[in-house]
Amino acid sequence: MTISRTGGRCDIAIVGGGIVGLATAYSLLRRDPRQKLVVLEKEAQVGAHQTGHNSGVIHSGLYYKPGSLKAKNCLEGYAKLLQFCRENEIAHEVCGKIVVATSQSELSQLEMLYQRGLANGLDGVRRLDADEIKQLEPHCAGLAGLFVPQTGIVDYSAMVNCLRDQVANLGGTVLTNQTVAEIQSRDETVRIASNSAEFVADRVVTCGGLHSDRLARETDRDLDLRIVPFRGEYFELEPEARHLVKNLIYPVPDPNFPFLGVHFTRRIDGTIECGPNAVLAFAREGYRKTDFSVRDFSQTLAWSGFRKIARKYWRTGLGEYRRSFSKRAFVRALQKLVPEIQAKHLRPCGSGVRAQACSRDGLLLDDFEIRTNGRVTHVCNAPSPAATASLAIGDSIAELVLGDKSH
Ligand SMILES: Cc1cc2nc3c(=O)[nH]c(=O)nc-3n(C[C@H](O)[C@H](O)[C@H](O)COP(=O)(O)OP(=O)(O)OC[C@H]3O[C@@H](n4cnc5c(N)ncnc54)[C@H](O)[C@@H]3O)c2cc1C
């Protein structure tokens, strides 16, 4: 029996054709191209969700706790990503970024970031005073800052399409329009049922992004985390205002919510993106404010961990909603970094939804989380910088899966 749209027998099945799933498939096939491998993606094309809606930044590894999976995989993945882009002629640029403190109260956190950068082994990170900030970004106001030379920008959609082609060249099969609804672990094999076919595999890896918890629950009914979706909305600078930003300008992150804080990002196509904010999404793939899914929203509300977070941080959440519904509030947040920005310089330019894992105890899981249950490995939490880190994550999952297979 061969693998086809109507199902079949394979060595490894990967659920999810985002950058993590395809990087995993690529790594597995590079190690052993004789494997019969299939990637099952529910959309009509790969990279349709987080991977295709992100900021396009190649993160340096500055922020992450030394020793964490994020720090390790971001640094390793950074080098692998640059090599992959060079070999495959994917548009990218290492342009550097600045992180800017705009109030005295942020200075200690800025210094902590600097020390973290050193601890993570980043070469060339340097402190900036107000004049040095102006030399790099003439329209940026800040008391002090950091310059991070390693940060870059890339076209992640081009990268994920290239990974899909590489997987096919190595003999893998990428099937789209295949929504996996059931995963059943048996003694010797795993049965996977999609909307239209049934597959039997020796090993399964799920990389479901916004649906990672649902896929993980297929083999672990007591799973102690759930995905809470947060929509991030962007504006872009009108062409006449693009001169206000050269590269990437970030605020000092709030240690409780490192993913909050609107910033400026030059994209690889030359446009300047502003944002994103982060508001609770009422649908896991809810890219518009009005998108609502009864199933998704009721599952979020039913999760005790989410209710604990909501009780604790409702004020922060309201601030993000204010920036979602009021362009003025969004502009005010941007003006902290670049005071000349005005509402007329901004036009809406889409959104992305982050898959944020939340524990039963009410913690937003910061680190990557990968769990193995018998023959099935689940990527449960792969938030930013998982696009940067994807090739390293793929390699470590491949080691895990092939290592297991040889036993
Ligand atoms: C707004 C935003 C900005 C970001 N900016 C950056 C950045 O600048 N740099 C960076 O490194 N990271 C960034 N990230 C994070 C990064 O984009 C993600 O960590 C990364 O894309 C995760 O990849 P993934 O493959 O796990 O998930 P996804 O790209 O979401 O892919 C998961 C795939 O699984 C499929 N799937 C789900 N359920 C099923 C099922 N039942 N059957 C079949 N298929 C299924 C989905 O359709 C989807 O294609 C950002 C994220 C967001 C949302």
Image: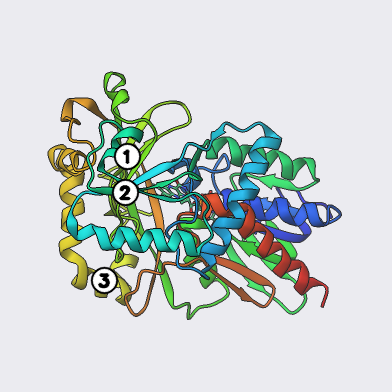
Q: Are marks 2 and 1 in contact (CB under 8 Å)?
A: yes
State which mark lies toward you, 2 or 1.
Answer: 1
Real-space CA distance between mark 2 and mark 1, rounded to the nearest whole angstrom: 9 Å
Decide which of 381, 122 is in the foreground and name it.
122
Q: Can you identify the residue that label 2 sits on? A: 145
Three-letter amino acid code at disc 3? Ile
Residue 179: in sight, yes or no?
A: no
| Comes first in the chain, label 2 or label 1 | 1
Q: Can you identify the residue that label 1 sits on? A: 132
* Mark 2 residue CB less than 8 A from any atom of ligand 1: no
> Which residue lies at the image location 67% right of the left edge and 74% below the top edge?
185
Q: Can you identify the residue that label 3 sits on? A: 309
| Comes first in the chain, label 3 or label 2 | 2
Q: Is residue 354 left or right of residue 371?
A: left
Counting from the top left corner in percent of width and height, residue 77 is at 60, 53
Location of residue 325 with respect to 103 vertically, above or below: above
* Mark 3 residue CB less than 8 A from any atom of ligand 1: no
Three-letter amino acid code at disc 1? Glu
> Which residue lies at the image location 21% right of the left edge and 67% below the top edge?
313
State which mark lies toward you, 1 or 3.
Answer: 1
> Which residue lies at the image location 39% right of the left edge and 58% below the top edge?
114
State the image quarter where residue 134 is shown. top left
Counting from the top left corner in percent of width and height, residue 115 is at 41, 63
Three-letter amino acid code at disc 2? Gly
Q: Which mark is residue 254?
A: none
Real-space CA distance between mark 3 and mark 2, rounded to the nearest whole angstrom: 31 Å
Residue 151: in sight, yes or no?
A: yes
Decide which of 390, 283 is in the foreground and name it.
390
Label 1 neighbourhood size at 10 Å, few (<14), some (14-19), many (20+)?
A: some
Location of residue 5 with respect to 271 vertically, above or below: below
> Which residue lies at the image location 65% right of the left edge and 51% below the top edge?
23
